[in-house]
Amino acid sequence: MSLRINETISDLTVETDLGTFSLHEWIGDSWAIVFSHPKDFTPVCTTEFGAVAQLKDEWDKRGVKVIGVSVDGVEEHKGWKKDIKTAGGADPEFPIIADSDLAVSKAFGMLPAEAYLPDGRTPNDTATVRAVFIIGPDKTLKLSMTYPMNVGRNFAEVLRALDGLQTAATHTVATPANWNVGDDVVIPATVSEEDAREKFGQYQTVLPYLRMTKLPG
């Protein structure tokens, strides 16, 4: 069963190339993003982790910790990071979980409980371990995205979605299609007209159930 939105992630103790720690303790009071991959030293994944490394300033600006997951071991991760730096032109300072026992992959619903790693495996054996999970400070899953092995992730969309989640959490609003920071937001249908006027002042009623407004400056 896949991990569902608003479910609390398992507080697993994970081994990474930067040490061993509890996931909940590592997240602390921050937002966190888990990027998972089916195997080290694979082409698309290497470009993606390079992109994650390039975005360090963007993660820091948003108060977000990032962590990778791959089912290979710590020594493979250390070697792979050299390739990631070569491909991406930035030092990957984030930890990568060594999920060789598949505990994280199973806890997050990326693999069935009976999954195992066969001898001489290929990335196809763990192809479903290729996802993005955005986790809130309350340790619950806020958003997940799953990709096939032959399509690289769009990190502009990851950042946009993260901005939407943080904006919604801070201002108790929703964000419409194609929203970007600075665009109008949606007033939730559960907010009364009176409360909407008090909180947002003027707003546009597009439909009885669709009210748009600007966030306070």
Image: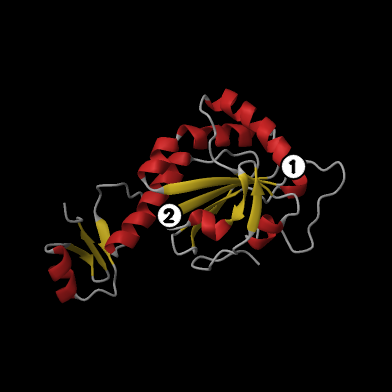
What residue do we see at 67% from left, 37% from top?
A: 77
Left or right placement of residue 156 versus residue 150 in this view: left
What residue do we see at 72% from left, 37% from top?
A: 75
Q: Residues within 10 Å of mark 2 (few under 14, many from 20)?
A: some
Q: Which residue is mark 1?
A: 123
Left or right placement of residue 180 versus residue 110 in this view: left
Pinpoint residue 24: horizontal percent, then vertical percent. 54, 60
Checking the image for residue 184, the label placed there is: none
Q: Amino acid at mark 1?
A: Pro
Q: Which residue is mark 2?
A: 30
Residue closer to the observer: 20 or 89 = 20
Q: Earlier in the sequence, mark 2 or mark 1?
A: 2
Pinpoint residue 7: horizontal percent, then vertical percent. 53, 68
Mark 1 secondary-structure assignment? helix
- Whether residue 176 appears in this view of the structure is no
Pinpoint residue 128: horizontal percent, then vertical percent. 68, 51
Left or right placement of residue 60 versus residue 214 in this view: right
Residue 174 sits in which quadrant?
bottom left
